[in-house]
Amino acid sequence: MKLRRIEPIAVRLPMRRPVKMAGELVSAAHNVLVRLETQDGIVGWGEAASAPMMTGETVASMVRAVNQIAAALSVIEDPQDAQARMHRALPGNHGAKAAIDIALYDALGKGAGKPVSELLGGARRESVPLLWTLATGVEADDIAEALAQRRAGYAAFKIKVGIADAAADAERTAAICRELRGAELVCADANQGWSRDDALRYVRGIEQLGLAFLEQPVAAADVDGMAQVAAASRVPIAFDEGVHDVDDIRRHHAARAAAGGSLKAIKLGGLGEVLAAAELCHSLGMKVNLACKIAESGIAAAALLHLAAAVPAAEWGVSPTSHNLDDDLLASPLRIVNGRAEVPRAAGLGIEVSEKQVERYRLANR
């Protein structure tokens, strides 16, 4: 496939309300889109959130990276060829590479008349249940949102913790769990928010609640701390910020530091890389959560759904985050009914991006 242009587009997307997580209050999404055009006039779209605390990337650095990598991608054979070229052009920068990779898959799928899930090896499922994140940081507000989404058909929920002292977070978790009794899955995510001692204090406070997992309770680099918490906890421990490639997964498995974890394209660098990580987890008996970063638009959400269709399993749920936005970039929304999202069936990502909306939220001089 011959490429005419790869354009990075920085956007600021307003959120319907702020998301509270450990060490951060997110009130708007600062993301980079990639608009890719082939010599045949096919346009592919990709997206990645800037996540300095997770990937080390900012909007400005991602725009620079996309421009630097673009010169190495005038002609590509397939996504694997593109990944090799991107790696040679610039190490790291996984978010920028993920945005390019998604756009390439979109264009390749459109050219072949196939949905991205088929390019990833074939769809194993046509729809997936979604995991709703509760992230106000306020017990009453989290409960009200949980009950509203339960009525809308959602049966899986993630509670953001690590935003207060461990005892207060445990009390809020317990209160939410009481209201969600009977839900299929409830979990918590600390986003590296605690010391080892605080994490142990939290798991002791919630061990009778039946949480499916607790995500990244301590710092990403503290694999020994993850293992210590895992050894002391009845609740399975999940990795997130601590994993950026398959070797990191093997390291957590060998240390008994996690029973599974959250896989994101911005951490791993592309859709094929997420698929390979999910397949490795499956072979090791580790469970998988597939997620977007808070918050990404329907572009990244569509890519996530194609991954969810193709992976062996996502026992710990699928978490698109476009619902956190006050407005989206798609001409028509993804179809979600009773807490389940349909995997788009049209060619490529199976979505239509509104270029008018893109221009509306474009950041100047980036």
Image (cartoon, rainbow, N blue to C red):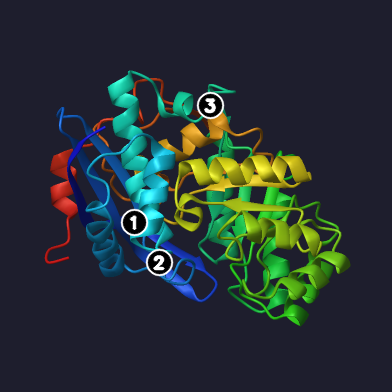
Look at 33% across and 59% down and name the residue there.
89
Look at 25% across and 39% down and name the residue there.
75
CB atoms at circles 1 and 2 under 8 Å apart? yes
Where disc 2 sits, the SS reads: strand
Point out the tag, 1 or 2, that comes first from the N-terminus: 1
Real-space Cα separation, disc 1 to disc 2, in angstroms:
8 Å
**Considering depth in this image, is 31 or 335 the residue closer to the camera?**
31
Say whether residue 15 is left or right of residue 139.
left
**Considering depth in this image, is 266 or 341 the residue closer to the camera?**
266
Point out the tag, 2 or 3, that comes first from the N-terminus: 2
Residue type at the position of mark 2? Val
Say whether residue 183 is left or right of residue 71.
right
Whether residue 235 is visible: yes
Q: Within the image, what quadrant is residue 239 found in?
A: bottom right
Residue 141 drawn above or below residue 224: above
Q: Mark 3 highlights which residue?
A: 121
**Which quadrant of the rendered structure holds the C terminus?**
bottom left
- Percent of width and height locating residue 233: 84, 64
Q: Within the image, what quadrant is residue 234 found in?
A: bottom right
CB atoms at circles 3 and 1 under 8 Å apart? no
- Percent of width and height locating residue 64: 24, 65
Q: Mark 1 highlights which residue?
A: 15
> Dot 3, how many residues are within 10 Å of its Cα: few (below 14), some (14-19), or many (20+)?
some
Numbered mark located on residue 26 in the image: 2
Whether residue 205 is visible: no
Real-space Cα separation, disc 3 to disc 1, in angstroms:
34 Å
